[in-house]
Structure formats: structure tokens, C-alpha cells
Amino acid sequence: MCGIVGYIGGQNAAPILLEGLTRLEYRGYDSAGIAVLGAKNAQVHRVVGRVRNLAAALPKRLTGKVGIGHTRWATHGPASEANAHPHTSEDGRICVVHNGIIDNADALRAQLADAGVTLASETDTEVLAHLIARSGADTLEDAVVEAVSRITGTYAIAVTDTAHPDRLVIARNGSPLIIGVGEREMFVASDLAALVRHTSQVAHLDDGEFATVFATGYRTFTVDESDTTKPATEIDIAAEDLDLGGYPHYMAKEIQEQPESVERIIRGRLDDRFGVARLDGLNLTPRELRGFSRVKILGCGSAYYAGQVGATMIEELARIPADAEAASEFRYRNPIIEADTLYIAVSQSGETIDTAFAVEEIKRKGGRVVGLVNVVGSTIARACDGGVYLHAGPEIAVASTKALTNMAIGFALIALALGRVRDLSNADGQRIIDALRAMPGQIKSILDEGPRIAEHAKEFATANSLFFVGRVRGYPVAREGAQKFKEISYRHAEAYQTSELKHGPLALIDAALPTVAIVPADELTDRNLAAVQQIKARGGAVLAVTHEDVDFGELDVPRIVVPKTEPELDPILLTIPLQLLAYHAALSLGYDIDKPRNLAKSVTVE
Ligand code: F6R
């Protein structure tokens, strides 16, 4: 969703802002703009569409060493040049870019209009530019503090003032904002991706925090103007991690990276002596781990499905009741928070607002919540009481792949930690550890099947509607398979529990509606095969994602065979071919795989 960049230093700001905005393109947006402070005024340029359109629309000589830029995802008002950021005050003195949503914008717009202000856009953000400009405060900082005190909602903002061309003033509440520290130059961004090319030294603002950013340093402070000392820290992302590296799409790259990203999440965390996972970041003693009598996992979209995989693993390995719930629903049902429940928030970006709100709700009610998060230093990671970083590396494609695999592995590690302070034996712990160690090699062998999976994908991409079915451990696999397929190939794909087919959906089966069936070699194989038979008997095509040992007998069913692991971990490997299936389906249909329509990489608004 929306992205912010800012620059102040000795170089021309425009190319740096454009490059930063390009780095943020993956988040999804519909318009873009920059403001550069010139000798006397701010030069604002905005376009509907891509950053490259903005670059093409800029005047040849756009000089100025201070500026802000934005990619907008329309919320208040459609994607139009007038609604694109930066927004300016009537006299052009103040420019503002904003991520988030101002809840009381309508009331503030009405008040401003009554006071004679001509509003130039339909956005919520514009009110900030006017409020700051109309403030009688002595300093820009005071004016920004005063303006944000009048708004409710979420924001990350960056402000320039032609009267104070030596600074940017920025503020954060519920939407990320990071300062990048350079050599006599400073950067601001809502996402590390826009900074890594320039610096590895960053400082994250906290909610309720403000900063004045000069070319030579920065000062962070609170609403009552007291200083908060925020030293910069080193980040572990290299600029090359964000390149395509020869792949046609980030999604292809990220799928292929999985053997290495799985190595990274397990590295140093497997303890062979005690058959357990070492997870110091959880900040939980063995006694505390023992004290939990329930586990509740919260995430959104695919992260929620990974949470369902995790809940089953935890129940099986640790024998604690566990379930996953969509974080987007959780807060709205006034959830009962129990002291002996371990809450786990799972998120790739660490910025999904629904998941962040769920964490807030749990903490407000005194619950213990840990995070399973990919992006280091992200909002959710910092809000949790502890956690396990996924170490999947940067994920750029909107459709998540490698981060989800690492989420499932992260749950296996947590299940080991919970299980080994209970009844899981050392030998069983070791069985899981050995299986986790074998996983990178097994994933590689599935990826080698890419060309065969691509053939099936081409065939399935021609259907308008598909079913994905699985049972128990296989059901979240089916849900994730359907999710991936629909989000990038725009085909209707629906997941069902295989056992539920006969209770309704079977009525839809015919030659035009193919089914992807998850048929692992486990205690439910026979039942899964019986369901496949029922689908075939009604003329439905079936593609089975299965194990070598499964005997399909007379059933003529094309198969994608994945290596067998321990039954508890089967869902991890069964999901990999479904990523390739979705990718190749979208490829054969010619869609924009990395940036599917209507979707954003991190969903920072409700
Ligand atoms: C699907 C997908 C989304 C995310 C969801 C949560 O491929 O990527 O469903 O899983 O928006 O995002 P995070 O994990 O960043 O909280």
C-alpha cells in the first residue's frame, strides 16, 4: 500500500526520491508524486499510474536538495492527479505525504471549508497541509504536533516547509516510518526497501513519535516535545536481495530461494542433544512454556492459513489445544483473553494493521503474545513480548511464498519447544529435527519438477472455476493453494474440506470444474481416494498432490508427487507445488504476476 520517501542532503533530491519510490512499487499503488524544495518554492509533480510515468513527466532541470515522495493507494477519493500526494497548503508553503487513514477527515474538511479554505482534493491527507500551515505555532515542529493532535486515525507523515528548507518533520502513529542515516545526508522511508541502496544505518520511529531530520542528523521527540533518544541500528538486508537476480519475476525468485531460506530459519535453532528447538527470542522460560494450556494464532490471509498449519502441528506435537483465527475478525468480537493462553501473531510484513490491532487488543487485556514475523524491527515484531524471526529474506512479490514456508517451519519450532516441556519424547523431537534438516533438499527436488507442474498449470488456467480440497492437515494446504491461484490468475478457486464435498459442493462438479486434491500418504489416504473417485465419477478432472506410496489403483489421475516427510510436517512440502501451479497458471494467462490487481503487499489500512 502507500509508500513514503524523503531526502535531505547534498545531492539532487528528485532522482533519489524516484529511485526510492520505484523500490516501493511492489507494495501496490495507483498514483505517485514528489515535492522538491527549490530556491523559493516547492515544486510538486504528481501523476496517475506508475513511477516511470512520474519520471517522464518531470521537468529536465528539477533541482533541489530536499524533497518528499509518495506512492498512493486510493482510500479517500479515486486515483487522480489531484488526489495524489504530496498535498500542499493554499500558499504552497507546506507539503505533506501521508500513509494511513485520518478517521475524522470529513469533519476537519468541513471546518476548513467553513474557515474559507479551498480544498483541492478529496483526500483525508490534504487537511494536514492546511492545519499545519494555519497553525500559529512558532516552529514547524510545533505546527505538526498541533495538527496531528487534531486528527484521529493512523498516520506516517513527512512534511516540508519552504520557510524551513533545512529540515523534514516526520511523525508516526500506526504506520511505519524509518530514518536512514547517511554521510551528511538523511533519508526517510516507510519501508526499508527504499533505503538499502543508500545506507544500512536506520532508526525506526515508534507510535506517537516525531522527528526533525536535518542533513547532518535528526532529533526524535514526543508530543510534549521531550526528546526520545533513538540511536540508529545496522540492518541485515543487502541491496542485491531486492533485485530480480536474473529471474523473470520476484515470485519465481522467491519460490526458488526456499531451500536457502529454510536453511536460514532453522540455522542455530535445532538442539540435537535434547531434541528441541532453541528459541531464545520467545523470552519464555521452560516453566512459562509449561504453564500455557492453550495456543491461539492470529494472522491474515495466507498467514492465517499458515497459522492453521501451525495449530495442527502444535496440537499434534505438544498436545495443547490450538487454533488459528483471522486477525481481521478477532478484535471485533471482544475476545476473551486468557492468562494461560499463548497468543502467536504471524505476519510476513509485520505491518498488517489487522494483525497489529489484534496484538494491541491482547496486550491491552494483559495477554502474552509472541510474534512469528519476517521483517525485523517491524511494528508487530516490536509490539510483541518476544518472537521468532522468519529470516526468509525480503519478499517483494505480492503473493507470499517463501515467508509462508518459513512460517510453517517457525510453528514446527514452537511446537517442539512447547512439546518438549510436556510429553513429546526426546526421540520424537529428534525425529522432527531430522525431518526439518532434510527439508531444503526435499524442497529442491520439488522445484526441479517445475516444468511438469507448468504443464498442469496451463491446463488448469483455462478453467473459470476450480476446487482445491484437502482434509485435516491437508485442508490449510488446499486453502493456501486456492488463495495463491485466485490472487494471481484471477480464476475463481475455492477450498473445501474433502469430507465436506458430499454435503453440497459436489453438485457443482462437472467437466468444466477441475479439482486439485491433496492426497498425502497418511491415516486419511483411503478416504481422500474415495472422494477423488466420487469427483471422477461425476466427470470432474482431478490433479492430485500426493506421495509416492499412495496407490491410486484404477484411478486415472495425473499426480504431482512430493517427498514424504514426518506426517506433522507434510503440509509444508505439499504446499510448494501449489505455489508453482499458481505461478505458471498466471504466467500462461499473461498476468502481472508480482503485482496482481487490487492487492497490496502489506495491508496497512483496515
Ligand atoms: C497472499 C498474501 C496475503 C498475506 C496477508 C498477510 O499471498 O500474501 O494473504 O498473507 O495479507 O500479510 P502479512 O503476512 O504481511 O501479515
Image (cartoon, rainbow, N blue to C red):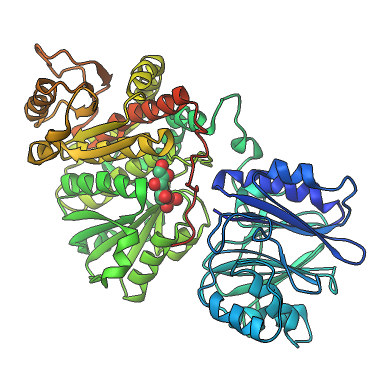
Q: Is residue 267 visible?
A: no
Residue 178 point in image, percent of width and height = 63, 60
Q: Position of residue 6 (x, y in %)?
A: 72, 58
Q: Is residue 487 above or below residue 73?
A: above
Evaluate whether residue 592 shows in this view: yes
Residue found 64% across the figure and 35% down from its top: 240
Indicate the position of residue 360 as horizontal and vertical percent values. 39, 69
Which residue is more in the foreground, 282 or 276? 282
Quick check: 452 left or right of 377? left
Name which residue lies at 65% across and 82% down.
112
As drawn, 352 above or below 476: below
Residue 93 occupies which quadrant of the picture? bottom right
User: In which quarter of the view is residue 606 placed?
Assistant: bottom left
The residue drawn where x is 77% and y is 65% is 217
Q: How many numbered discs, if any? A: 0
Q: Residue 331 appears at what percent x and percent y? A: 32, 68
Q: Quadrant of residue 120?
A: bottom right
Looking at the image, is 142 positioned above or below residue 487?
Answer: below
- Give the camera-side residue of 137 and 223: 137
Left or right? Give the position of 603 relative to 464: right
